[in-house]
Amino acid sequence: MNESDKEIVDKCLEGNGHLYEILVTRYQKKIYNIAYRFTGSKEDALDITQEVFIKAYNSLRKYDPNYKFSSWILKITTNYCLDIKKKKRVETVELNLDLQNNDTTVSAENSYIYKENQKAIYDAINALPEKYRIIIILYHNQNQSYNEISKVLNLPLTKVKNRLYRARLMLKEELEGIRREESEWIVKKLQY
Amino acid sequence: MDCKKASILMMMFLDNTISESDKLRLQNHLEECNYCKQEFSLLLESINIIESIEEIEPPSKIKDTVMSRIDTNKYKEKSKTRLWILWITVIFSMTTGALAYLVFNNAVIVKEILIPLLIKFVNFVTLTLPVLLVKIEENFFVLMGVGMVIISMLLSSIIILVALQYYVTEKLEIKFRGGFKF
């Protein structure tokens, strides 16, 4: 079980395809979550995850061992997600992020505000153009480095940084808008 | 420090690449500038929310579905079959090539030197083979014709085999570890 990804890939290529299940076990959660964050549908995420692993296995000879397997499979995932989005361009997706608040010490009111802000941010992520959305998910939710994102998306490092910068500002503006609406609502409530 | 520079430092802070001195400069700026202070607080909150999104567990069937839909012998069969075909092709090509060269260019040598030598050698060993070889010698040109037909059949079958292999296995993709691509 402690074999490296590269060793497992080598063994698969030598004819031990059954060992591929170790790689599936290792990366299914990551791929599934990215696909889910990107599509907002558990059903689509399941299909994408399965297809990505099958596609990766069938292209195993194309894997360059100089790169990390995780980056390679992430690249297949993001390409696949973007392709699917292109095909479903007309449909709007709702990012269902399982709103959870485990902090039991916060008051009901705070919890409500937190959830509202959370929802606002989720909506804002959904509203981001795909090229920004994928970067913010990879960087802030999947902890991928700039270098990894640059490799995965085949973009220059400066472009990755620039897009992340803009995406953060867009999200901040969204939250700002929500806050403004909230305070206007409170002022109105006080006036009556 | 102006707000534009502060905005860049905020991003560096989020990237965790900010130096201690820049952090201090940012802090000083935020104490003086309410606008940036609010912006920074909103940025931090947005990022905290994204980072706090909990990962969900994938359905347990993923692994089984993937493993049932892939051919776990895909590379075993291909690597062996491909190498066998490669070796057979190489050996046949070399043998038939050498034979063809010998027959076409050195018919005299074969007929007048090699075969008589062989006959003399085999004469010592057995009595039956010389008779056969004499017959070969007698019918040399007929046999050479038959030989050429066989050789051309072999060559054409090899060409068909290689062409088939090429199309069936996506441009004969034999990739050895280390980057060598056949």
Image (cartoon, coloured by chain):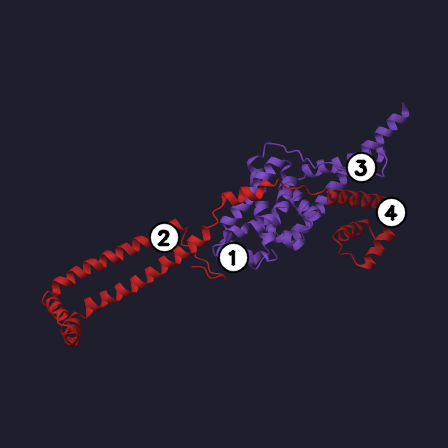
Mark identifier at residue A163: none
Q: Where is residue A160 shown, x and y percent of the image? A: 66, 50
Q: Quarter of the image holding residue B105?
A: bottom left
Q: What amino acid is at disc 4?
A: Cys
Q: In this figure, which residue is indicated by the disc labeled 3? A: A114
Residue A117 visible (yes or no): yes
Q: Are marks 1 and 4 on the same chain?
A: no
Which numbered disc covers residue B33? Answer: 4
| Chain B drawing hue | red
Q: Is residue A129 visible?
A: no
Badge 1 and badge 3 in a common chain: yes
Residue A165 vertical position relative to residue A112 in the rendered view, above or below: below
Task: Tell me the residue that label 1 is attached to.
Answer: A11
Quadrant location of residue A77? top right
Supply the letter of whichever chain is purple: A
* Above or below A132: residue A94: above
